[in-house]
Amino acid sequence: MKKSELESRYIFLSKVLEEFYDVHYEYKNAKSNSKKYIESRLNTLVDRAENYINKDDEFYNIVTIGNTVYERAVSLEGTFTIRNFSRDMPEILERLKSFIENLKE
């Protein structure tokens, strides 16, 4: 995978996380009648990131931790939930950023 492609994927996932933060803030301050709609927006963002990571095996192997399929799956376990996304996604982005910085063009 080329460095430029990884950089564009990093930017995409960063934007998803940024939007998640904005919508999550909205969710925390929303009245109960609009929380369901906002929660569905949060789930959409989480699903978007999950699908983006899982759609390509090479990329998946870069952003996950572990040597086996099982270890890699466990490293993402729980990440793609509203509750854990804002905690785990920055770690994934940090690993990706580090990987990109260590690549030679």
Image (tube, rainbow, N blue to C red):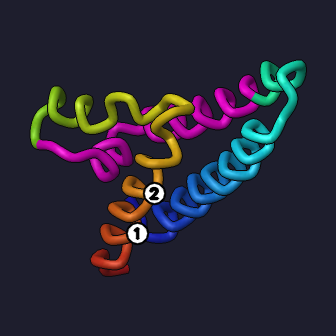
What residue is drawn where x is 32% and y is 29%? 77
Q: Amino acid at mark 1?
A: Lys
Q: Is residue 103 magenta?
A: no
Name the image quarter holding the N terminus: bottom left
Look at the magenta stretch and give its main secondary structure.
helix
What residue is drawn where x is 34% and y is 50%? 63
Q: Secondary structure at mark 1?
A: helix
Evaluate whether residue 55 shows in this view. no
Magenta extent: 39-66
Dot placed on the residue nearer the N-terminal end, 1 or 2: 2
What residue is drawn where x is 80% and y is 41%? 29
Q: Which residue is mark 2?
A: 90
Name the image quarter holding the C terminus: bottom left
Packing grade of label 2 (10 A; few <14, some 14-19, many >=20) is some
Residue 67, image x, y percentages? 10, 42
User: As drawn, is 96 to the left or to the right of 45?
Assistant: left
Q: Which residue is mark 1?
A: 97
Evaluate whether residue 41 shows in this view. yes
Q: Is residue 58 magenta?
A: yes
Residue 39, image x, y percentages? 72, 26
What residue is drawn where x is 46% and y is 40%? 53
Please tell me how many numbered marks the rendered image carries: 2
Q: Amino acid at mark 2?
A: Pro
**Quadrant of the rendered image containing residue 40:** top right
Q: In this rendering, is residue 68 above or below 99?
A: above
**Quadrant of the rendered image containing residue 45:** top right
User: As drawn, is 75 to the left or to the right of 41?
Assistant: left
Residue 80, image x, y percentages? 48, 31
